[in-house]
Image: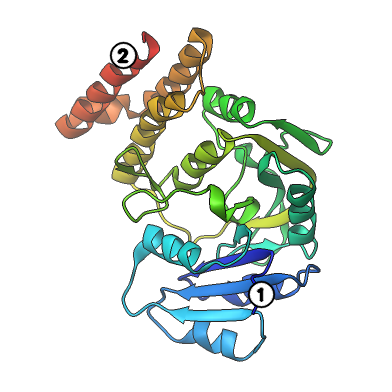
Amino acid sequence: MSAPLVSILVPAYRERFFAEAFASALAQTLADTEVIVCDDSPGDAIGAIVRAAPHSRVRYVRNPSNLGFSGNFTQALSLARGKYVKFLNDDDRLHPRCIETLAGVMEANPPVVLATSRRAVIDEQGRAQPDIPSTTPIAHVSSFMAGRDLGDFCLVNGINLIGEPTTVMFRRGDVQVEEGSLFRWGGHEFHCLADFSLWLRLMAKGIAYYAAVPLSEYRRHGGQEQRGPEAALECLVERELVLPRAASLGYLAYPEQRAAAVRAVRHMAAPFAPVAREHAGVRDAIAAMERRLAAFEGR
């Protein structure tokens, strides 16, 4: 059986919206695809949904034990046979022409290492919602841009404008897995910035493409991972840890860019000041982060 052009990878865990995500993968206008569902859920509902819609292009893998967020994504990537990879979160949806559009651009333009698009925000019922800061359009016309320039723009503004895993397509051969994890970079396992850290590694290799029309839908709902104070602090620290790793790939090459990126992290750290005054652990973590930021800014 010949390898497909594109692998749509669904690292599934939550069953609530999975049927809609899976249906959007099957509805793609590009036939030269495979859909791989890696089921990390505790129940049988996801498998039942897949079995109810048998398709020659679908492969279903039930993980024998829970692999967790990073492990399930890494497992899905290891099973892909396509030249191009498109992750699909189990609560999001793809526009029917998403795969055809992005794969067509990448096939016609070999220097493009990452293709993304505008994404629409939807709620639990699938109703359109206003943009949030991270879904603000990068451009109002479809554009090619240097990958490092787009990465710099995100870093100095402290925001991932490129998109969630559902939004982006890339070449399978361009990805390097560190110590068995797709989201490990420079010895750190990224979680909050898992997708963005991967996009930075990819974009350092060439050109990025942005489709100005929405090709995917990003669902916001109450069942998404809740962020308590400890998790919020972890996210803040990751925003600092990504800076020197990005710089090692050629991002933030100028002092002004480094200073702007550091200011963005410090701005996000400001709300932690009252907590830091009361909790030594938070205070120590913020102080250590500040020392690293100062060293990075003055390099």
Front in this rendered view, residue 80 or 96: 80
Q: Is residue 77 above or below residue 104?
A: below
Q: Label 1 vs label 2: CA separation? A: 51 Å
One can see residue 130 in this view: no
The quarter of the rendered structure image containing the N terminus is bottom right
Asked if the residues shown at circle 1 and circle 2 are in contact, with their CB atoms under 8 angstroms apart, the answer is no
Q: Which residue is most to the front? A: 2
In the image: residue 12, left or right of residue 284: right
Q: Residue at x 36, y 10 (%)?
A: 299
**Label ID, residue 250:** none
Give the x, y percent position of residue 122: 67, 57
Q: Secondary structure at mark 1?
A: loop
Badge 1: few (under 14), some or many (20 or more) residues near its Cα, within 10 Å?
Answer: few
What amino acid is at disc 1?
A: Ser
One can see residue 190 in this view: yes
Q: Secondary structure at mark 2?
A: helix
Front in this rendered view, residue 83 or 67: 83
Residue named by callout 1:
2
Q: Residue at x 43, y 57 (%)?
A: 225
Q: Which residue is most to the right? A: 141
Badge 2: few (under 14), some or many (20 or more) residues near its Cα, within 10 Å?
Answer: few
Give the x, y percent position of residue 52: 62, 91
In the image: residue 64, left or right of residue 3: left
Q: Residue at x 73, y 48 (%)?
A: 106
Give the x, y percent position of residue 114: 64, 44
Give the x, y percent position of residue 292: 29, 20
In the image: residue 212, left or right of residue 192: right
Closer to the N terminus: mark 1 or mark 2? 1
**Label ID, residue 295:** 2
